[in-house]
Amino acid sequence: MNRFDESDAFEGASLSARAMAARPAPYLDDLNPEQRRAAETLDGPVLMLAGAGTGKTKALTTRIVHLMNTGRAGPGDILAVTFTNKAAREMKERVGRLLGQPAEGMPWLGTFHSICVKLLRRHAELVDLKSNFTILDADDQLRLLKQLVQASGIDDKRWPARMLAGIIDQWKNRAWTPDNLPASEGSAYDGKGPALYHQYQARLKELNAVDFGDLLLHVVTIFQRHDDVLRQYQRWFRYILVDEYQDTNVAQYLWLRLLAGGHKNICCVGDDDQSIYGWRGAEVGNILRFEKDFPGAAVIRLEQNYRSTPHILAAASGVIAGNRDRLGKELWTEAQEGEKLRLIGHWDGEEEARWIGEEIDAMQRGTRGMRPYSLDAMAILVRASHQMRAFEDRFLTIGLPYRVIGGPRFYERLEIRDAMAYFRLVVSPADDLAFERIVNTPKRGLGDKAQQKIQMTARQHGVPLVEGARLLLDDKGITGKAAGELRLLIDGLGRWGRMVGDADISHVELAEMILDESGYTGMWQNDKTPEAPGRLENLKELVKALEGFENLQGFLEHVSLIMDNEAGEEGEKVTLMTLHAAKGLEFPAVFLPGWEDGLFPSQRSMDESGVRGLEEERRLAYVGITRAEEVCTISFAGNRRVYGQWQSQMPSRFIDELPEAHVDVLTPPGLYGGGYGAAASSGIESRAAEANVYNSPGWRRLQARGAERPLSQPSEARHSVIDLQAMSAHTVGERVFHQKFGYGAIIAIEGDKLEIAFEKAGTKKVVARFITGADDVPF
DNA sequence: TAATGAACATTTTTT
DNA sequence: ATGTTCATTA
């Protein structure tokens, strides 16, 4: 084995020398020495430890180009794996740019999952599947598990199916099939976990379906059981590259180790300090262990940072230094000093939101002694998504445009999934899960009882549910209004199904027809809740997305894996998202609110995972700080309403860990000691603000600018033109519609602010331009 | 069967 | 506080 490795490496080296002499490689000149080494060390295992903002994608893409340019590999011989479609897209694009032509021919550059789908479709029969298997998402998965749980007579109160789904996911992350589940797991889910796992997998096989975890797991199983297949791919993928290695789980690790087992030409890129998906099965251990797994690996550290100022980097380093078990990295930069981190405490969460809103407005206008920042240049990164509400409420009232990243993805939304279920059922009438989803959506009077009858009939005859329903109708098993509706649905499905291949009608028109004739569109048109117009809008978008595909089948095939719909929102907006969603992004100015013990670091994380959990939270803090290019503002609130209860909490322990020399302590304007005093009484003086705030640089700066009114009126100046129109556009008593709060009636008008009694959301003051007349709701 | 209210839980979520 | 899910009613 050793000998093989050596000779292999030797041969590679000589090849490299030859090839490089033959072809110039000007693209290498753009790299710093470490990046260059990472791009040039082509043979054997390489671990690229790339800190935040150190140009890892540049190194990685250059490496790919260099592999091709030296003649070591063609585009089809390189396996390059990412976690997200976005990352894959970006890599493809950048390789293309380096090559000076579109990188069309890299069929094996993609996400773990998309690559596994390709492999699994080729070898499906080796795990008892047909190659046209369907991919279930979390929703289908849960419904399936619910059925099994119910059938097994478990008290699903105490043992919710959602929990079983979580357990099974973790098992799959660890590459444990039902047959090689360790004995230690026997007690999971009231001791029924292993048996249910068995049943679940069996049921999936019956349905010719897989879940996300299976995509990896089945391929690993195939590789383990069929040496010939494995060896074929080992030869095929001559060079392997892995992005975000710190986020790989055990199954992905095994998958990689199997594929790299022969030549060991594997280059893993990652940053142990940015491992924040442990709770999803990611194993930091994979990256920490790399040198043991691949003896003789070249370890290359990318430490020169091109993103942030020295203050920001120093603060980030100070925080992350609290973690043990690091591979160790120290970021440095040639950038100008810039601003220190800004730290500010507030009385409560609402004040924090108010202050940040005002600060964003001030920074936008450049009245903070810094350059002006556009709204697009600023982001608020929160630990938990529920923190976003305070900001949304505040921004809506002051009229600050914002965009939320994350939340339910387009294809996960209720109406989209319903519509998709209709399409699925039309294309494949045997899709029972889809049938169950839409039999009674819109309401057709087919409740539990009727559905059970359908189930029974179908099972007795051993046919899919649609067929069962038809038989039941013929036998008069269902009567009255429900029967008529069901007949209508079944006939419709048949009719639409026959039109699938029809040349006279495009698949887009067909989709529209399905949604209309099934009554699905009508259901939302008659719905008066505030969400309904948005849902109709989404359905329109779905139909539009169809245009990009040849036919319905093709669309359905692709959608299951492409869950990222970056709704390209136009217009300047502040970005609001979770810290997790922010990984890989950067902004000139970043706000990090909610740094309080219990919230961040999250209590739950610490309770459940102890020191390991705390360290992951600390890495999250590190990720947050390193998102900032120029200005990073951290804040905390002394009091916060948590699930409706007021709670006081201490500033985050991570605040203590910020090196003082790189932090300015600001004081909330207008409240002098007020906001701070409250925090002080809960322990702040012994903590971060060791320095008396009145002596702090931030305070002095504030005084020096005494003339400036810190509490600005954000919206008026900017929107005055619009406001004039707005003022004349509304009258007291008018019924209006608001994107977030729904329908309501105007109680009072004060300038551009309208006081509105909303039907669902209570009375709020809202800026006029966020209001439309109740009658011209979109759609 | 659909509508109502009580009980409940409530981090992060690349595919 | 709020949204969801379940069980009970009409």
Image: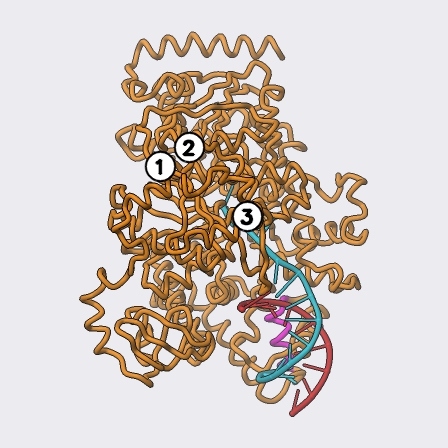
Chain colours: A orange, B cyan, C red
Tell me, yes or no, if residue A549 can be seen here. no
Secondary structure mostly taken by the magenta-highlighted segment of the chain: helix
The local crowd at label 3, few if under 14, some if 14 to 19, many if 20 or more residues have their Cα within 10 Å, is many
User: Picture quarter containing residue A485?
Assistant: bottom right
Q: Residue at x 27, y 42 (%)?
A: A369
The answer to whether residue A465 is magenta is yes
Q: Which residue is mark 3?
A: A596
The answer to whether residue A57 is magenta is no
What's the amino acid at mark 3? Glu
- Quadrant the C terminus of chain A occupies: bottom left
Task: Give the label, 1 or 3, closer to the camera.
Answer: 3
Mark closest to the chain's N terminus, 1 or 3: 3
- Tag 2 subunit: A
Dot 1 and dot 3 within a common chain: yes
x%, y% of residue A732? 31, 84
Q: Which residue is mark 1?
A: A629
Dot 1 and dot 2 within a common chain: yes
What's the amino acid at mark 2? His
Q: Which residue is mark 2?
A: A662
- Seen in the image, is A464 located left or right of residue A758? right
Residue range highlighted in magenta = A464-474
Q: Residue at x 55, y 24 (%)?
A: A327
Mark closest to the chain's N terminus, 1 or 2: 1
Q: CA distance from mark 2 to mark 3?
A: 20 Å
Task: Give the label, 1 or 2, closer to the camera.
Answer: 2
